[in-house]
Image: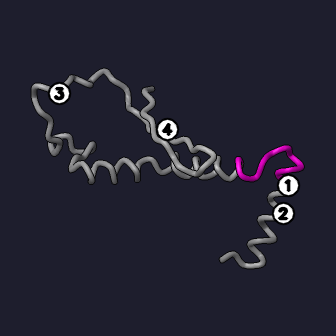
C-alpha cells in the first residue's frame, strides 16, 4: 500500500506531466518499457536457462545438424516489448 508521501509524489508528478501535455498512464507505461528494455539481458538469460541453452557458450547449445543454419553474417536479434491498454505485454523479434 502506498504511503501518504508516495501518493503526494504521484499526484505532483501527474500534475507536472499534465502541464507538459503528457498522460500519466502513458508516461508510466513508457517507464515500464524502459525497465524491460534495459534488462533484456536478464530476460534472455532466463529464456536460455528455460531452453537449456547458453548464448555465451555455443558448445552447450544442442542443435539438429539438418535444421541448423549458418548465422555468422546475421546481426543480433532484439526483443521488442509493447503493451496494450489492458496491461498485457506482447513480445516480438526485431532484426537489426
Q: Which residue is pictured at 65% across the width and 77% down the height?
A: 1
Image coords of residue 6 (percent x, y): 74, 72
Is 96 in front, or is 30?
Answer: 30
Q: Read off the residue under disc 1.
A: 16
Question: Could you classify mark 3 by the number of other residues whose Cα lies within 10 Å: few (under 14), some (14-19), or many (20 or more)?
Answer: few
- Residue reaching furthest front? 86
Image coords of residue 70 (percent x, y): 21, 23
Residue contact between numbered discs 2 and 3, judged by CB atoms under 8 Å? no
Q: Earlier in the sequence, mark 4 or mark 2?
A: 2
- Give the structural element (helix, strand or loop) at label 3: loop
Q: Earlier in the sequence, mark 2 or mark 3?
A: 2
Q: Quadrant of residue 7?
A: bottom right
- Give the structural element (helix, strand or loop) at label 2: helix
Residue contact between numbered discs 4 and 2, judged by CB atoms under 8 Å? no
Question: Could you classify mark 2 by the number of other residues whose Cα lies within 10 Å: few (under 14), some (14-19), or many (20 or more)?
Answer: few
Q: CA distance from mark 1 to mark 2?
A: 6 Å
Position of 33 with respect to 94 (left or right) is right
Q: CA distance from mark 2 to mark 3?
A: 55 Å
Residue 22 in the magenta stretch? The answer is yes
Q: CA distance from mark 4 to mark 1?
A: 29 Å
Instruction: Determine which of the numbered discs, if any, sits on residue 80 in the image.
Output: 4
Position of 45 with respect to 3 (left or right) is left
Q: Main secondary structure of the magenta part?
A: helix
Q: CA distance from mark 1 to mark 3?
A: 53 Å
- Give the structural element (helix, strand or loop) at label 4: strand
- Give the structural element (helix, strand or loop) at label 1: helix
Q: Read off the residue under disc 2.
A: 12
Q: Which residue is pictured at 49% across the width and 38% down the height?
A: 80
Q: Which residue is pictured at 42% across the width and 27% down the height?
A: 95
Instruction: Determine which of the numbered discs, if any, sits on residue 68 in the image.
Output: 3
Q: Which residue is pictured at 21% across the width and 50% down the height?
A: 52
Amino acid at each position: 500500500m502506498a504511503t501518504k508521501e508516495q501518493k503526494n509524489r504521484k499526484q505532483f508528478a501527474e500534475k507536472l506531466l499534465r502541464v507538459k501535455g503528457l498522460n500519466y498512464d502513458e508516461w508510466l507505461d513508457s517507464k515500464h518499457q524502459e525497465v524491460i528494455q534495459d534488462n533484456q539481458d536478464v530476460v534472455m538469460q532466463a529464456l536460455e536457462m528455460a531452453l537449456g541453452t547458453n548464448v555465451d557458450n555455443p558448445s552447450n547449445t544442442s542443435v539438429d545438424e539438418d535444421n541448423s543454419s549458418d548465422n555468422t553474417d546475421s546481426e543480433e536479434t532484439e526483443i521488442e516489448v509493447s503493451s496494450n491498454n489492458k496491461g498485457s505485454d506482447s513480445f516480438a523479434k526485431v532484426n537489426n
